[in-house]
Image: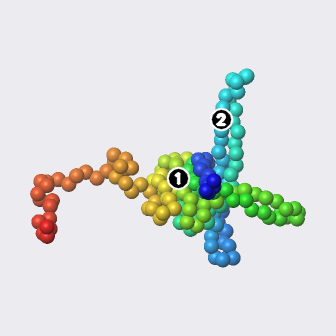
Amino acid sequence: MAGSVNKVILIGNLGRDPEVRTLPSGDRVVSFSVATTESWRDKNTGERKDRTEWHNISIFNENLGKIAEQYCRKGSKIYLEGQLQTREYTDKDGNQRKATDVVLQRFRGELTLLDSKGGGRGEGDYEGGGYGQNGGSFGRSSPMERTPGERRPAPAGKLSDQLDDDIPF
């Protein structure tokens, strides 16, 4: 095998408000938990069952961290892409522990807010767009992504009145 892939894609709800910590290097880390719920119907009883998994998220990407800090709140629905990373630490009782987090690295990862504006429990002033790893703008920027009310009407008048005659070719 030539290589390997470590990629996690989650759609879920924040279990707590994002927490911001500053590392000794001065870099900021934004952490929160995300719940994903799997639902099914029991074959024997016909009863609906749910299983919720909790995922620890750590964002080392400065731009994505700012978005999470500013717009995400407990209960917000988000889409994220990151990678699994296991860390070892010593708990307060002196026991060695391991924890696996979903990490959005400095130049990798994606975070998209899925709640509609004013909807859900995350009361951010956003348009429900996303912010990716490539420094794209936050919110909807493509004319195709705009709702009909956001689209600008075509300018009035004849086309010849709108053209610039000083074009050198």
Residue at 20% x, 54% y is 155
Quick check: can you spot residue 18?
A: no
List x then y, in percent, for residue 21. 67, 68
Callout in the foreground (1, 2): 2
List x then y, in percent, for residue 114. 52, 49
Q: Residues within 10 Å of mark 1 (few under 14, many from 20)?
A: many
Q: Quadrant of residue 47?
A: top right
Tell me if residue 137 comes above or below residue 123 in the rendering: below
Which is more toward the observer, 134 or 24? 134
Q: Secondary structure at mark 1?
A: strand
Callout 1–callout 2 Cβ contact below 8 Å: no
Q: Which residue is mark 2?
A: 39
Q: Secondary structure at mark 2?
A: strand
Residue at 13% x, 55% y is 159
Q: Amino acid at mark 1?
A: Leu
Is residue 132 toward the left or the right of residue 42 in the image?
Answer: left
Quick check: can you spot residue 35?
A: yes
Q: CA distance from mark 1 to mark 2?
A: 22 Å
Q: Amino acid at mark 2?
A: Ser
Q: Residues within 10 Å of mark 2 (few under 14, many from 20)?
A: few
Which of the two discs, 1 and 2, labels the residue nearer the N terminus?
2
Q: Which mark is residue 36?
A: none
Q: Quadrant of residue 59?
A: bottom right
List x then y, in percent, for residue 152. 28, 53
Q: Which mark is residue 113?
A: 1
